[in-house]
Image (cartoon, grey):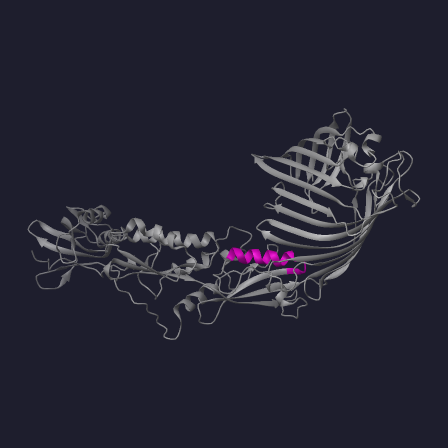
Amino acid sequence: MHQNEDVRFTSSSIKLPQFSPLTVHHPTLNPFFTNLHLILQNFPKFQHPFHQNGGSSQTLSKFTHPFHQKFNPQNAILQFLSKPRNINPFSWSLSNTPLLCCSSIALTQSNLDGTPSLGPKTGSGNEERVLISEVLVRNKDGEELERKDLESEALNALKACRPNSALTVREVQEDVHRIVASGYFCSCMPVAVDTRDGIRLVFQVEPNQEFHGLVCEGANVLPARFIEDSFRDGYGKIVNIKRLDEIISSINGWYMERGLFGAVSGIEMLSGGMIRLEVSEAEVNNITIRFLDRTGEPTVGKTRPETILRQLTTKKGQVYSMLQGKRDVDTVLAMGIMEDVSIIPQPAGETGKVDLVMNVVERKSGGGISAGGGISSGITSGPLAGLIGSCAIYHKNLFGRNQKLNLSLERGQIDSIFRINYTDPWIEGDDKRTSRSMMIQNSRTPGSLVHNHPGGSLTIGRVTAGIEYSRPFRPKWNGTAGIIFQRAGARDDKGNPIIRDYYSSPLTASGNTHDDMLLAKLETVYTGSGDPGSSVFVFNMDQGLPVWSEWLVFNRVNARARKGLVLGPMRLLLSFSGGHVVGNFPPHEAFVLGGTNSVRGYEEGTVGSGRSYAVGCGEISFPLMGPLEGAVFADYGTDLGSGPSVPGDPAGARLKPGSGYGCGVGIRVDSPLGPLRLEYAFNDQRTGRFHFGVGLRN
């Protein structure tokens, strides 16, 4: 059978080359550098969430402020990779496929004199229709396909082309696209053949190769197992372009989920059924710090660049992670000496890597004077009960190293604390983020929690000096070790030293007017997400060291745990604390039970004071309106029968029950200091009491 010379279909072949060498039109540019440069031109900078100017004037409007909307870190790179590129014509997304729209078909019919004329206009408008008697699918040589399943796939893809139908050029063209869009064929050519029964429309197709192997280039952080699993079900089968597009999307999704700056940049079919997958990952080449003033102009910074750089988890040679960059911005802001921080990635020459520029705006002054006030839970009577005023002189950035010096004074009706504190949040030269804190403190606190009596007030004076080292040792875990010297003694309301209280119970362990002790401190802290109600665990131990014979020797352990559970709109908060002291210790150091942060419904310290203790609390909070929350709670505390073992048995002399429980209701209001709590509770002695507290219950 010969091809019809009077009516013919002409079409540019839709073909995906099996051998597609990497070509770049510009002879002097590295192709990946060109891609990266274009990507970064439209790439948002990272900044802290309260900054109101989202980025440069070139930033895409969609990404103007990445923290005020859902932001996929890879959108910029994927937008670029979905466009037609010169690198490899086999790379595309089926949702945006310019190669699938290159077919053109023309219909002509010759008169006897050889002049072309249009056929009968049976369609709408000016479109001509040609009657087709038969529709077949053949290979590129016009022969039957060896695999009938591929023939069925092509026939099933047809929508308009059916036997005994009149077709327009557009309808044939659309069916050509549908055959190629099925994903099994790399080319399709429509051919009209004249037969005795009429015009036969033959779609000459070229199936893709069978998949027999994979070569992946450039994937340094993408797990090999992930790639193998993605391609495993395709081994020995005809390559399907739709399936390849799904694999590309899953690989790009892997990078997006982890905030990594990488994506599939090319895919190519090689001989023997091999597929070459090219992945582009932008590694960090260099990180620099740029100081800006409030107007955005470069300036000279007071902070040493190395002090900022060591805070960053992003390092040279890593694949750039957007999520990691955001965490680094938050970490630098948490130093407390920066007003604004942002990260801008830029191409690193022609290396295919990125340079990161961190713009920082320092606060006007690293030091200053502050004043404030608070409430002491230890004062329960008097016209100014519990009120404390405070002032401080501080510097947050000594020597440009983020070291902090604080001189503070707090003064209340009875309480007073004068403290000098120096903190180096990261010791220079240490790679474990070890911090160091040195402290000297002179304080007076009420002794009424243990030694309250009707004859007058009693205060405990302490002079303390020590040094502590702290560092994270596991994610969410932090450890502290230190040495603290303390001299403590009691004084009456006139300021005179005393050694016995109103009930003749001793006030010191040594029998002198003061006790000296050198304490070795160990503490470990686990903090969950940091959200209110998240899991918290604290364990600390103090060990008295017998450096001098008169110094106290004792061991004190204390533990606190808190767990929050979400129950629909409500939240359940469970907490537990307990401790024990072994050895010779002053009675005012006994564990105190009762009060706002212990057993509510009781005054501070009126349940008991013991050598041991255990306190449990259950609380259910629920939203009321706006920032208000309601709460229902129950507390229980006991000294485990250890009250009489405290020197002088101060709890027994004051008829403290040693155990008790309370339950009640309260409201919560969020504030910058934490939740403000107003509560009313009844105890087991059927008396009620209001409590006011700041922050979550200890």
Q: Nearer the viewer, residue 496 or 38?
A: 496
Q: Nearer the viewer, residue 137 or 574?
A: 574
Q: Nearer the viewer, residue 595 or 196?
A: 595
Q: Is residue 299 left or right of residue 7?
A: right
Residue at the location (44% across, 55% down)?
255
| Residue 202 spot, x, y in % from top left | 15, 53
Residue drawn at the location 63% of the way across and 39% of the way down: 562
333 inside magenta stretch = yes
* Start-end of magenta stretch: 322-339
Quarter placement of the N terminus = bottom left
Is 297 left, or right, of 484 in this rendering? Answer: left
Magenta stretch, main secondary structure class: helix
Residue 31 visible from this viewpoint: yes
Quadrant in the picture for the C terminus: top right
Q: Quadrant of residue 263?
A: bottom left
Q: Position of residue 584 (x, y in %)?
A: 78, 42
Residue at image position (63%, 36%) is 573
Q: Is residue 534 above or below residue 72?
A: above
Residue 166: x, y in percent?
A: 17, 49
**Where's residue 398, x and y in %?**
72, 64
Count the numbered circles shown.
0
Q: Quadrant of residue 396?
A: bottom right
Tell whether position 200 is magenta: no
